[in-house]
Amino acid sequence: MGEIKPTLLVLAAGMGSRYGSLKQVDKIGPSGETITDYSIYDAIRAGFGKVVFVIRKSIEADFKEVFQRFEKHIEVEYAFQELDALPSGYASPADRKKPWGTGHAVLVAASKITTPFAVINADDFYGAQSYKLIAEHLIKTANDDKNTYSMVGFELSRTLSEHGHVSRGVCTVNSQSQLEGIVERTKIQRKDGKIVFVESEDKMIPLAENEVVSMNFWGFPVSIFNHLEKQFGDFMKTNKDSATAEFYLPMAVDNIVKAGNAKVKVLRSPDNWFGITYKEDKDMTINRLRDLIGKGIYPSNLWNNK
């Protein structure tokens, strides 16, 4: 048997609603690449052997038209996050429009994943070293304790927007580099040269430049699906009639850790995270990529060079 190759699970079910049509997915690379292109390119280089996209049926044709190019380079499968993908005995409320959350998005892919896997957002740029770190950890721990989870942590200062405030999951990490908790902080911004979050109109709380934050880049063994299935069942008992409640992945992981069923190793990335939170962020993203290409980290045309 060869070395286990981890799977990359890409959460993309929300892309259609964000862009209106996938044909308008932001092109940020010099040869028309999207952020997703760079994610898959980095994953292949890091040793991932398969990609599973979580999408919705309504965007399937557009999505495959844009992203079928990946199938030449890595095994690709699709899972569908639909409102009616629910435990037996439940039905989606008639007024429900939004998906059931990131924890549910991971759960619907269970049948497609047979190896340790990482989870990312489709429209976040995490950096080449981030994929290398988590791939190495997933491969190294593949035959270890099945309760070993991982998370790529970013330095807060490397995740800010120059064009407005952001929300981040600020992490508490112990001396063994294990995650102890995540607190969601909103309205984080630079003010007079310092990073702060706004607690109220007249109260700004400072945050350290090197605070570790979660950007929803996780690593799991397949055993997490059993925990997610149970938790989602409990969630539905309480929220079956809700048009808005969501089953979030960080919340689910926090519950698993607090129950003593897993530990999360925090892998600190040296990379800059970036995404397009505000429309003005697009130019910054293009410029940062241009710099990385100039340093030889990426070719100017991703797929013609593979």
Image (cartoon, rainbow, N blue to C red):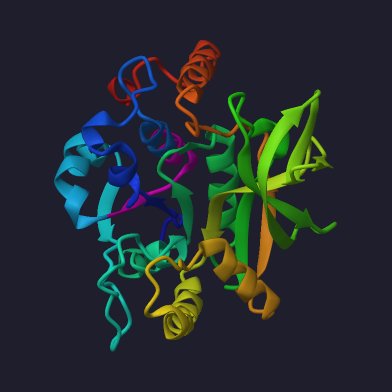
**Vertical order, 230 against 93 (above or below):** below
Q: Residue at x 41, y 63 (%)?
A: 106
Q: Can residue 144 be spotted in the picture?
A: no
* In this picture, residue 4 sits left or right of residue 254: left
User: Where residue 188 sits in the image (x, y, percent)?
Assistant: 69, 39
Q: In the image shown, does 248 or 32 lie closer to the viewer? A: 248
What is the tally of numbered marks visible in this picture? 0
Q: Can residue 12 be spotted in the picture?
A: yes
**Vertical order, 11 against 18 (above or below):** below
User: Where residue 54 sits in the image (x, y, percent)?
Assistant: 32, 55
Q: Residue at x 69, y 76 (%)?
A: 258
User: Where residue 36 sits in the image (x, y, percent)?
Assistant: 38, 36
Q: Residue at x 35, y 61 (%)?
A: 99
Image quadrant of residue 40? top left
**Quadrant location, the N terminus:** bottom left
* In this picture, residue 289 sits left or right of residue 155: left
Magenta span: 41-55
* In this picture, residue 139 sits left or right of residue 77: right
User: Where residue 153 sits in the image (x, y, percent)?
Assistant: 66, 46
Question: Is 177 inside the magenta-drawn segment?
Answer: no
